[in-house]
Image (tube, rainbow, N blue to C red):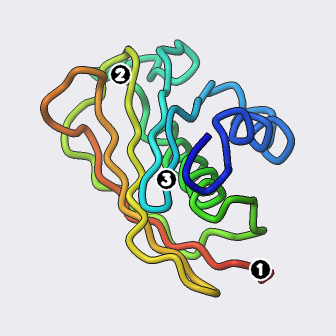
Amino acid sequence: MSETGFSIEDGKTLLAEAFAPWVLQQNLTPTSFSKTQATFSLPANDSLALRGGPGAGLICGQAIAAAADTATVIALAGANGRFRNCTTVDLSVNYLRPLPMGDTNVTVDIESNGRKLATCRLTIQSKGASKPAALATATFMYLED
């Protein structure tokens, strides 16, 4: 159980109940929550890979962006101790280097979590890598108090 009372199981339940089936196929899994940070595992999954061209076998950018967006919603629920209905206002992803197929870590740092808006910074990198493959910022608006 995290310091906010929102558990890993709560995060998994929220994923299963609130997100589209194609989002669930990513198998994004929460691994820790606090008021200021959450971590996730994105396991190797061939359905996230580019199919052809010079990038064949790499995790595609669309999957990285979707994982970032999804992880942020769950991270904010963890920080708040409950899900607050919210919507993406802005998501910006900077792709720094190719992300090879394999287990991937997603870290969400909650920079600001106000009454109406929340802003987060994300790091996406291969498990065990010393450098991130992508950095993202996400701003969400709460639709309820």
Marks 3 and 1 sit apart, C-alpha to C-alpha, by 22 Å
The kind of residue tagged 1 is Leu
Marks 2 and 3 sit apart, C-alpha to C-alpha, by 31 Å
Q: On the image, numbered disc 2 is attached to which residue? A: 58
Crowding near the residue tagged with mark 3, few <14, some 14–19, many ≥20 C-alpha atoms within 10 Å: many
Image location of residue 107, percent across then percent down: 38, 45
Sequence-first disc among 1 and 2: 2
Q: Marks 3 and 2: in contact by CB < 8 Å?
A: no
Residue 109's tag is none
The kind of residue tagged 2 is Leu
Element carrying mark 3: loop
Sequence-first disc among 2 and 3: 3
Q: On the image, numbered disc 1 is attached to which residue? A: 143
Instruction: Give the residue drawn at x 82%, y 47%.
Output: 18
Crowding near the residue tagged with mark 2, few <14, some 14–19, many ≥20 C-alpha atoms within 10 Å: some
Q: On the image, numbered disc 3 is attached to which residue? A: 34
Instruction: Give the residue drawn at x 69%, y 78%.
Output: 142
Residue 131 shown left or right of residue 80 in the figure:
left
Marks 1 and 2 sit apart, C-alpha to C-alpha, by 36 Å
Image location of residue 40, percent across then percent down: 48, 35
Q: Quadrant of residue 78?
A: bottom right
